[in-house]
Amino acid sequence: MQVADEIADLLSAYSLEEVVALAVTLSAAAAAEENPEVLESQLHAILELATTGYVDVGCVSYLREIDPVGLPGEIKEYIADLLAG
């Protein structure tokens, strides 16, 4: 969870390539995450990365693998927002 928070804190230091790589990596990690708190942190970091304008739906396609059943509403909203582009 701390790593995802640090990614968001260092947002202005990343290049386009780094933002895309981080978004893809975080979305893959999120798809496999079982802890809702960690998942929320990962999704929040991806949303922060998306504010750069470099993250598109293709970067977060792994999020489609997440089963939203049983997840808190806020997490479902994060996923929906990211997949909506």
Image (spheres, rainbow, N blue to C red):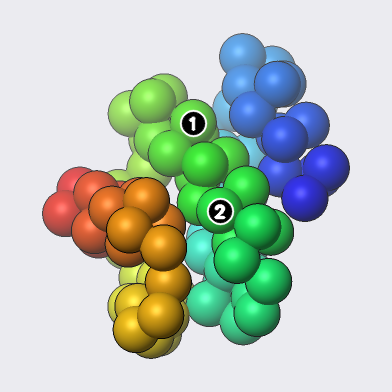
Q: Residue furthest left?
A: 84
Q: What percent of the width, then of the height, locates residue 60?
A: 40, 61
- Can residue 26 be seen? no
Secondary structure under tag 2 reads helix
The answer to which of marks 2 and 1 sits earlier in the sequence is: 2
On screen, 57 above or below 11?
A: below
User: Dot 1 surroundings within 10 Å: few (below 14), some, or many (20 or more)?
Assistant: some
Between 20 and 50, the one lying in front of the other is 50
Q: What percent of the width, then of the height, locates residue 75?
A: 41, 57
Q: Residue furthest top?
A: 12
Say the numbered circle drawn on residue 40. 2
Q: Residue at x 33, y 28 (%)?
A: 53
Q: Residue at x 24, y 58 (%)?
A: 80
Q: Are marks 2 and 1 in contact (CB under 8 Å)?
A: no
Identity, as a three-letter code, of the amino acid under mark 1: Glu
Q: What percent of the width, then of the height, locates residue 28?
A: 57, 72
Between 2 and 51, the one lying in front of the other is 2
Q: Is residue 20 left or right of residue 4?
A: left
Q: What percent of the width, then of the height, locates residue 39?
A: 59, 62
Between 42 and 16, the one lying in front of the other is 42
User: What residue is pinned by disc 1?
Assistant: 48
- Can residue 8 be seen? yes
On screen, 72 above or below 6?
A: below
Secondary structure under tag 1 reads helix
